[in-house]
Amino acid sequence: MGIYKSLFKQTAIYGLATVLPRMFSFILVPLYTNPAVLNVQEYGEVSVIFSWMVLFNVILAYGMETAFFRFYNSDNDKKSVIGTATVSIFWTTMVFLIGSLLFRNKIAHFTHIEVEYITYTIWILVLDALVIIPFSKLRAYQRPIAYAMVKIGNVVVNLALNLFFLLYLPKIALSNPDGFLASIYIENFQIGYIFVANVIASLLTLIVVLPNYMHIQWHFDFKLWKRMMNYALPILVAGIAFAINETFDRILLDYLLPKNIAKIDVGAYSACYKLALFMTLFATAFRLGIEPFFFSHANNEEAPKTYAMITKYFIIFGSIILLAVIVFADLLKVLIIRDDSYWEAMKVVPLIILANFFLGIYHNLSVWYKLTDKTKMGAYISIVGAIVTLVLNFLLIANYSYVGSAIATIAAYGSMMIISYYLGNRYYPIPYDMKKILLYLGLSILFSTIYFYGFRENYFVGIGFLILFIYFVYRNEKPTLLRILKKTI
């Protein structure tokens, strides 16, 4: 059981740098959904722009970060790997910057986004792309504290600037109209200030890591670059597919719905989608800890049994989180989504939380293609998910709006989960306790469905279901849980 202690420690260490920034950014949701700051339509516009940013962040990285790690650890000439990766990212980013600025008016026309916001978005994407390799170097040099501090610092600066621009600057300008700060205040510029804050935070991050550009050999090895690109391109395809699964439904909602309601529906859907963050944080922290654990125990004869046990407990804890968030969703919405005009989209919350749970299960099941060096299979599975996302969104949005998008999301992640399980049994059999896994998952979904769509906001029923489910798990898993707790304390 000592391996579980190692797992829990790794989950905490690897999860902190990713989870903490997400928690900080989560604080922005009540700010953006405050009717004194943004209305639903404006928040919808911000959400569409951020969705495009997710896609282009993947494109501008084009798998080079992963390729950097692969070749940095396998090639003897590490300086050449650093130089080649840096030069590659730098010049592709410069080409993107010049091209996108030249054609920003056409981009604005195609995306139905104002040119001014397109300009800010371009600069954010460029600044973020230029720190990819410096951040990768920090990880390669095993400097996790420096890496985490810069990452968290970026989010803290972004959060502070958002609060300043959206809450305090208007009050200061009103109370002291002749002051300096009043001179930089622009009325009805809330969306612009959000992107200005992002530009400043990204620029400061680049300045912090800028010494990395001063202390490398600007040497470009074309043969090495070709090998790196051959490795990176499948990762790029998988990344694009993942971005489509993650955020493209907002773009399609904006594109397919009538213009008078598109941004409003996107805003409501995006805000309520944020309630899935609790599941996402759990799954992300677990995944970041579990991947090095999986690889470090790959040669152990008992590895398949260990993986099966870990996956079962991931599903147990995930099922509890699923039920708990759904039971208390209407309390959370008051704390997180300040404007009740967003609450119409609350009906999709159970679907979105379950979809993200399926994604977490998929990442746990994906151990088979990582350990058998069949990583291309991961790209193929992600492509299948992207196809499901696109097809169902095109079929359902016209009649069901964001409910159709939620159905598409759960279908995409559910299909990826099932396909991975099926292929895993073929290439790397793991003795999952499917009877208990399906029992816990099914019972959690059943209780969640009955409560939310039958007894919503009746907390006697909801809490009763939650206590009953936890007790049921405890009775079935008591011996194993006690052994794990004893070994990890």
Image (cartoon, rainbow, N blue to C red):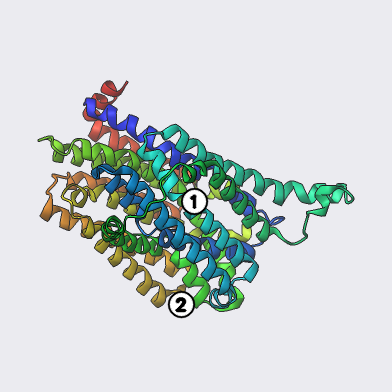
- Tell me the mark number nearer the camera, choosing from 1 and 2: 1
Q: Mark 1 to mark 2: distance in Å?
A: 24 Å
Tell me: residue 97, above or below residue 70.
below
Q: Where is residue 42 in the image (x, y as percent from the top left)?
A: 64, 64
Helix, strand or loop at mark 1? helix
Q: How crowded is mark 1: few (under 14 residues within 10 Å), some or many (20 or more)?
A: many
- In the rendered structure, the answer to whether residue 291 lies left or right of residue 403 reads left
Q: In this view, does 216 lie to the left or right of 365?
A: right
Measured as percent of width and height from the top left, residue 374 is found at 18, 55
Report whether 486 appears left or right of 27: left
- In primary-sequence order, the first of circles 1 and 2 is 1
Q: In this view, does 207 lie above or below 422?
A: above
* Crowd class of label 2 (few under 14; some 14 to 19; many from 20; radius 10 Å): few
Q: Please state the horizontal and vertical placement of residue 364, each as a whole percent of the image.
A: 27, 47
Instruction: Quarter of the image for the N terminus: give it.
Output: top left
| Residue 221, percent from left and from top | 32, 55
Q: Which of the two residues, 44 or 275, is positioned nearer the viewer here?
A: 44
Residue at 44%, 54% in the rendered image: 452
Under mark 1, the amino acid is: Leu
> Residue tagged by mark 1?
275
| Label drawn at residue 231 | none
**Based on the displayed image, in which of its 4 quarters is residue 382 positioned?**
bottom left
Identify the disc placed on residue 399.
2
